[in-house]
Image (spheres, rainbow, N blue to C red):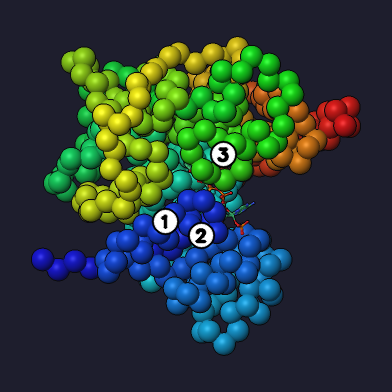
Amino acid sequence: LVVRMKRVAIFGSTGAIGRRTLEVIAHLQPGFRVTALVANRNVAEVARQARELKVRYAAVADERNLPELEQALRGTGIRALAGETGMNEIAASRDTDIVVMALAGTQGLSPTLVALEQRKRVAIATKEIIVAYGDFVMAQAKRSGAEILPIDSELSAIHQCLHGCERSEATRREATRREATRREVSRIILTASGGPFYRRRDLSRITVKQALNHPTWDMGRKITVDSATLMNKGLEAIETARYFGIEPNRIEVLIHPQSIVHSLVEFRDGSLLAQLALPDMRLPIQYALTYPQRLPRLVAETRLERLGPLTFSAPDLKRFPCLGLALKALRQGGVKPCVLNSANAVAVEAFLDGGLKFTQIPEVVAWALRRFEPEGALTLDELRLHESVARDLTLGRCRAMGRNHR
Ligand SMILES: NC(=O)c1ccc[n+]([C@@H]2O[C@H](COP(=O)([O-])OP(=O)(O)OC[C@H]3O[C@@H](n4cnc5c(N)ncnc54)[C@H](OP(=O)(O)O)[C@@H]3O)[C@@H](O)[C@H]2O)c1
């Protein structure tokens, strides 16, 4: 058996997912090698990683940081790149087999599409790209026959329930798989930890520090706040619909505070399949890199007898309106998911900067959504324009609300 070394480009290498991807790749030696790294502003860290791993390319999404990156890499022979052009060059490079997309926000859309067009595997953590542009991303994967594997633990769980034991090329074919999923799956149940405030009655005085203290997962700041508002689960519902081609009314959410069952699939014969493991993102990252193979684990053993009871309950949409807003945007379709995503990103940033109260996040998102009609089929450029209009409108709204709040 000849196993070819897989060369990986990590977009977002300085973030929580990026750093864990580096750990997984170190564990998977000698089968995987990092060839390119992309960050945004943390030049010192991406340059340090690049020198240590002797990669071919290092890049910054924000072009203003290129001179600093070039300076930090002087004399190493590592090419410094920047912006969308630089990221696209990495995504298209012959030195890359797998692109791990873990940049915050939607800045990674273009390199994701380029990598798929070049028939490279994309292991995607950035749910915002699928939420806002999922139809385009999935269509590109279908056109070129490229594989796109989810890293989000819930989507990975669903993927594992549906395809985790398949070995043959034929059953991995996207068309066959989507058709079977539509025919045989009656419900997809996404689990949510509920975040740090699920048991709390009054959410009006939540501080940034409290919101960043997640009970079961250690993640970047934006997704941690999204988990606390339950917007994260709403984004995942949209991501699930887009990724698996499942109708919105077949997607449900359950609160499961222990974060052991990462999601479930119910089939039409009444069987429920679930994927279980201790909460550790290195497992879904490894699965997305090695699928369809299962390689030895890096994560701790899950001993169910040592865990307490596993509990499940229906979500409270009254106290956590973000989830309801996302589910409605999913049902309405068109530009709504893209607008929801864009407005939420701005509102969370404003909350993290102290310019908005926790409870104002859903107010701002609902306000932005009311400003847009769902609209029919749009081109990618039209959708990108809607995203930026939604961002500007929401910024203005946050500034106005922030003035009253401060
Ligand atoms: N963390 C998790 O457990 C988890 C689980 C599932 C899905 N995800 C998804 O994975 C993505 C990354 O999450 P994370 O927790 O790793 O986030 P994070 O720790 O905040 O890292 C974000 C990464 O993106 C870069 N970045 C930040 N702002 C950017 C911008 N405006 N444009 C381009 N790049 C930017 C950062 O670079 P600098 O360091 O240079 O600023 C960093 O490399 C998110 O979409 C999240 O929803 C995360």
Whether residue 398 is visible, yes or no, is yes
**In the image, is 79 to the left or to the right of 370?**
left
Placement of the C terminus among the 4 image quadrants: top right
Which residue appears farthest toward the front when viewing the image? 306
Whether the residues at callouts 1 and 3 have beta carbons within 8 Å, the answer is no
Q: Is mark 2 within 8 Å of ligand 1?
A: yes
Say above or below: 63 vs 316: below
Which type of secondary structure does the marked residue at label 3 adopt? Answer: helix
- CB atoms of marks 2 and 1 within 8 Å: yes
Quadrant of the rendered structure where residue 161 is? Answer: top left
Residue designated by label 1: 21
Query: Residue flagged by tag 1: what amino acid is it?
Result: Thr
- Quarter holding the N terminus is bottom left
**Secondary structure type for disc 1:** helix
Could you tell me residue 8's position as x and y percent? 38, 63
Q: Which mark is residue 223?
A: 3
Disc nearer the start of the sequence (2/1): 2
Q: Residue at x 42, y 61 (%)?
A: 22
Tell me what residue is drawn at x 59 percent, y 36 percent. Answer: 213
Residue at (45, 37) in percent of width and height: 135
Residue 189, image x, y percentages: 37, 22
- Quick one: which residue is furthest to the left in this view? 1
- Which corner quadrant of the image does residue 387 belong to? top right
Please tell me which of labels 3 and 2 falls first in the chain: 2
Disc 3 residue lies near ligand 1 with CB under 8 A: yes
Is 304 left or right of 77, judged from the image as shown? left
Mark closest to the chain's N terminus, 1 or 3? 1
Q: Nearer the viewer, residue 379 or 166?
A: 166
Residue behind mark 2: 13
C-alpha separation, residue under disc 1 versus residue under disc 3 = 17 Å
